[in-house]
Structures are given as structure tokens and as C-alpha cells.
Image: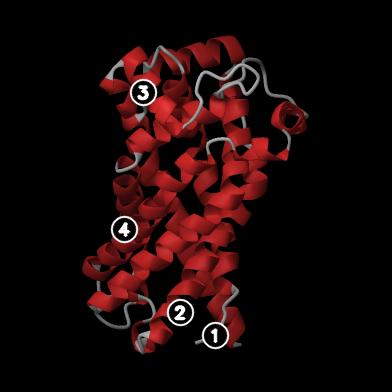
Amino acid sequence: MSFSFCDFLSGWGAGVCGLLVGHPADTIKVRQQVSKNAGILKIITSSIKHEGALSLYKGMSFPLLCAGTQNAIFFGVYGNTLRVLQSNSKEDSVLRASHGEKTPSQSYNFNVFIAGCIAGFVQCFSGCPVDLIKIKLQTKPGVPHVHEVMNAVRRIRGDSGWKGFYQGFHCMLWRDVIASGLYMLIYAQFVEYGAQDKDVTTILLAGGLSGTISWISIIPLDVVKSRLQSDNPRRPLYSGMKDCIIKSYKDCGIAVFGRGFWMISLRAFPVNAATFMGYEWCMNMCHRATQK
């Protein structure tokens, strides 16, 4: 068992690939979740009509800078945590089922899930400020400009200090920790049963399906997180996660917790297919380079 930088480097490549594919759909999803009018077509046409086609890429500059880092943290922590767990359970020969070396045991599947949960937990600490700034930019009217990220950072710090960057943090923990474990477990299972040797089709299908299933499972929490993070700290509508759930239900009914379902479902497959394709490609390149 040894520490590997390949997981971190490959995670960086995976993050950039996924963001480039999925950001426009993410902008539509966030606007659906925080507005009273949740129609997809109306949000798309209104955004393009009043703010231009580039409005669908609002808030992308900051995540683009951070996407590599975010996924580097997630996949780096995941890969190295799995190595520790596998070493402790004396199953180094099945370190990763997705490499197709062996049929994974039940303890391996459990280790994959736990490693994914730990990676999701760690990622939240850097991911919350990134998500917060992205959502502030996505829900702000007007045409994007080069200084928008720094303006958002100054505004958040001015309103709430440094703790303001963790607005919605507890909800993000609830959303991401278990879902991250499911994400990696489902991917490993789909790869295991998909093909003897991993090919492009298997990776794309496994990545797309794992992302779609894990995202669908957390849509209600994602709605609450989006509402909490888009809230104005100077005149907050919500005092916390529980208050947001109650007020959202009273204002819009139970259907509010399913907002963004179709956009998330449509976005999740190509984004996560691209993410895992980038991850696997970078891992292969890294392993080849280190073996020379």
C-alpha cells in the first residue's frame, strides 16, 4: 500500500471535463430551484432573451478554476482511502474493481462505499465556498463580466465575514456524504458487470448511470441547499435548513423538492460520463508515465 498522486492528478482532469459539459444545465437547474417560476423552457428563453446566450455560462469562471482542485481532492482522497481500507482488510489484490483484476468481495464493496463517503465529506470543506459563489453568480441578473467573481467574494465577506463562505454547509454535508459513497459504489458495480475489459462504452455508461442515480437520490436536499445559498444574508428568508424546508413547503408545496429533476437527470449522465472518462484516461496516462 502506497500513497498515489495519480488519483489527485486524474481527479483534476475529470473535474475539468465534467464542468465543461455540464455547466449550462447546472445554471438552468439552480435558477429553477430558487425561482417561483420553475419551467425549464421559460427559464432558458428568458435567460437568453434578457441576458444573452452566455448567461447559461454564468458563474463558470470560478468553478473552472476550482473544478480540477475539487475533483482532485475527491478522487485523491477516495483512491488513497480505499488503499488504506483494502490494506487493513488484507485485500490488496482487489484494490480497485474497476481495474478488472478480480470480482470484488463484499468487504471491497463496503470499502468503496466508505471511501466515497469520506471523500465526499472532505470535499465539502472546499466545495461549499465554490458552490456558494457559483450560485450567487448564477442567480444574479445582468450580463457576466470579468470582475464578477471578485465582486461576489467581496460581497459575501462584507455581508458575513469569512464564515459567510460556508452558508448552507450543513445541508451540503447531508447532500454529499452518503451520495458520494453511492456514486463510487454504483460506478464500481456497473464496471464490474459491464464488461471483462473496460472500454470506452463501459466507462461512459457506468459513469453516466452512477452520476444520474446518485444525483436523483439527493434532489430534495439539493433544492434546499440552492435556496439556502442563494438567500440574502442581510435580509435572510431562512434561519436554517429546517426552516428552509418548512417555508419552501408552505410556499410551493411538496413539488418544490423535486424541482430541477429533469434538468439534473439530463445533465447528470453526460457530465459524469465525461468525468469518469477523463478520470480513467488520466489514470492510464499517469500509470504509464510512472512505470517508465
Q: Are marks 2 and 3 in contact (CB under 8 Å)?
A: no
Q: Which residue is mark 3?
A: 246
Q: Secondary structure at mark 1?
A: loop
- Dot 2 or dot 3, earlier in sequence: 2
- Dot 4 or dot 3, earlier in sequence: 4
Nearer the camera: disc 3 or disc 1? 3
Which residue occupies the foreground of this view, 68 or 85?
85
- Residue 13 x/y as whole percent: 57, 58
Tell me the CA gap for discs 3 and 1: 48 Å
Nearer the camera: disc 4 or disc 3? 3
- Dot 2 or dot 4, earlier in sequence: 2
Residue type pointed to by label 2: Arg
Q: Residues within 10 Å of mark 4 (few under 14, many from 20)?
A: many
Q: Are marks 1 and 2 in contact (CB under 8 Å)?
A: yes
- Dot 1 or dot 2, earlier in sequence: 1
Query: Looking at the image, which residue is at 51% across and 71% down?
Result: 283
The answer to whether residue 221 is above or below residue 73 is above
Quadrant holding the C terminus: bottom right
Residue type pointed to by label 3: Ile
Residue type pointed to by label 1: Ser
Tell me the CA gap for discs 1 and 2: 8 Å
Q: Which residue is mark 4?
A: 206
Q: In the rendering, which numbered label is found on residue 2?
A: 1
Tell me the CA gap for discs 4 and 1: 27 Å
- Residue 259 x/y as whole percent: 35, 25
Q: Secondary structure at mark 3?
A: helix
Residue type pointed to by label 4: Ala
Q: Secondary structure at mark 4?
A: helix
- Dot 4 or dot 1, earlier in sequence: 1
Q: Which residue is mark 2?
A: 83
The answer to whether residue 104 is seen in the rendering is: no
